[in-house]
Image: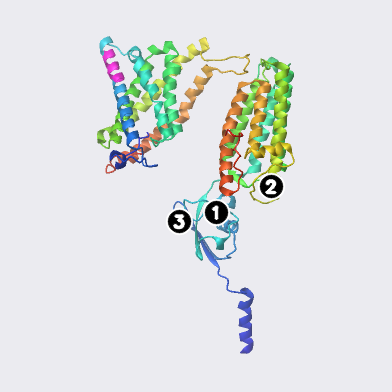
Amino acid sequence: MSAAASGTSKAAHGDVAAKRKKGPGALATAYLVIYNVVMTAGWLVIAVGLVRAYLARGSYHGLYYSIEKPLKFFQTGAVLEILHCAVGIVPSSVVLTGFQVMSRVFLTWAVTHSVREVQSEDSVLLFVTAWTVTEIIRYSFYTFSLLNHLPYLIKWARYTFFIVLYPMGVTGELLTIYAALPYVQKTGLYSVTLPNKYNFSFDYYTFLILIMISYIPLFPQLYFHMIRQRKKVLGHIEDYGKVE
Amino acid sequence: DKHLRAQSKRKPAKKTKKAVVFFEVEILDAKTKDKLCFLDKVEPNATIGEIKSMFHKSHPQWYPARQSIRLDPKGKSLKDEDVLQHLPVGTTATFYFRDLGAQISWVTVFLTEYTGPLVIYLLFYFRVPFIYPPKYDFTTSKHWVVHLACMCHSFHYVKRLLETLFVHRFSHGTMPLRNIFKNCTYYWGFAAWMAYYINHPLYTPPIYGEQQIRIALIIFLFCQIGNFSIHIALRNLRPPGSKTRKIPYPTKNPFTWIFLLVSCPNYTYELGSWLGFTLMTQCLPVAFFTLVGFIQMTVWAKGKHRSYLKEFRDYPPLRSPILPFIL
């Protein structure tokens, strides 16, 4: 949703002085290119891992285990993107990026990792697939944008695939959280009850339900924002490389 | 003939003692640049406030408080006190208008946001039905610190309400309407969250008992008096009905001596009060409320400190925004 700066030529021509509004300097650009290449590669590894596991087992079931570690690694690594915004080398809102990344990290660790029983659910495969395809496209989009050679195909893919992948991912996420609920309630996972000396309580089960409810106002907003972006970006084919 | 000439001389002489150049004012929409209003024969010493009233007549939906009038579409808002002829405009002045949205008075917002916590906390204190298990309805806590906490919390908000009505002198009349929803959610929400635990039947009193509670109460009262002293000192800086800004200095009241080290000691004392209340109740939600409030007050203090520095050349250099020497 938020491209790493430069469609402008300044950074690409090795302009060392980091201009305030026009994207990162040369060093920052080099770092971002490396970051985005590494992330693209990482998610490709996950994609390949999924395909190989499917071919080996012959079923869609339980593929999570074959990519568990790279998924955790690369999804958690995305936290760096919040830093990029905070430092200013990427012109996106810290809050928005933070929110998006943390929601992914939450699902990866606080739900899928923490509630072992949901790991064999097919809903996990649903959102992992959606994330994998999305991220491969997104990170290669950023890589090419930074290098100022963005193939129209990648731009098109980035602003088109989400139409299916977004709802697919959301469905997988919601189903997974829903599947986790009975186990969380039974074990009291991450929950604190009274009495205690801090006079505090937290019910993770209720919290997860509230999270699910929050998808209702949030998802449409994000989805239609992307649709609007799509009209803006793909609507003008002459505006090469110009990104929000 | 002579008679007629004398008459014609007299008439214009009455109207204009010396040649007065009337201004023409046109008001354009800052975004669309549409001409919204044209005022002719505007007195050169007319204020922006008066122009706003005139604009309001032709556009009754935009009362003066929600008008932002600027010289430049993206520039700063002009003040109501600014005089037309002292502005960098020609005899035909062009202003840009932005709608600030529905406005609500500061007094209204303060009264609403402070009455909420006062009432809500008491609902939990008296254990009104549907909050705790029914067997506890309308019972009272067996811990005396819970009664003390209720008194302190209530005192705090009553003090705030009275200060809003009788002490504070506001420089802005209004704020955007949506702020009242935001602010009330914050104050009312946190009040409910804190009150729920402090007045809970399973509440655990402070670990160090009476000692902890006593120290906490002293801190709380000290900071309440301090906060009040600062509010009085700030009020006395500003004559009634004025919007002047002056550098605050320590007065005879020892609680104001903190002005030597801090620009916004009202926030410093407020932090202290809530730290005292946290210690008194030993309740994590209270600690969270204190933390969030501290972050917000620090942002405000830094902003105020910066504008003091910008406005006054001789601003005391030793002062920090909110915490002596630290922040």
**Is disc 3 in contact with disc 1, using a CB cutoff of under 8 Å?**
no
- Chain where mark 2 sits: B
Instruction: Indicate which label's residue lies in the foreground, 3 or 1.
Output: 1
Look at label 1 and name its amino acid. Answer: Leu
Write down the residue under mark 1: B78
Point out which mark residue A81 bears: none
Indicate the position of residue B144 as horizontal and vertical percent values. 74, 19
Residues indicated by labels 1 and 2 sit on the same polypeptide chain: yes
Indicate the position of residue B164 as horizontal and vertical percent values. 69, 40
Point out which mark residue B237 bears: 2
Instruction: Indicate which label's residue lies in the foreground, 2 or 3.
Output: 2
Extreme residue in the bottom direction = B1
- Chain where mark 3 sits: B
Q: Quadrant of residue B229?
A: top right
Q: Which residues are magenta?
A: A45-54
Look at label 2 and name its amino acid. Answer: Leu
**Is disc 1 in contact with disc 2, using a CB cutoff of under 8 Å?**
no
Does residue B286 show up?
Answer: yes
Q: In the figure, A153 relative to A41: above or below?
A: below
Q: Residue at image x 63%, y 21%? A: B283
Give the crowd class for mark 1: few <14, some 14-19, many >=20 residues within 10 Å.
some
Write down the residue under mark 3: B34
Look at label 3 and name its amino acid. Answer: Asp
How far is disc 3 from disc 1 in space, using C-alphas?
20 Å
Task: Give the mark nearest the N terminus, 3 or 1.
Answer: 3
Task: Kindly state the secondary structure of the residue where label 1 is placed.
Answer: loop
Q: Is residue B320 left or right of residue B129?
A: left
Task: Give the mark nearest the N terminus, 2 or 3.
Answer: 3
Q: Residue at image x 68%, y 34%? A: B115
Does residue A7 show up?
Answer: no
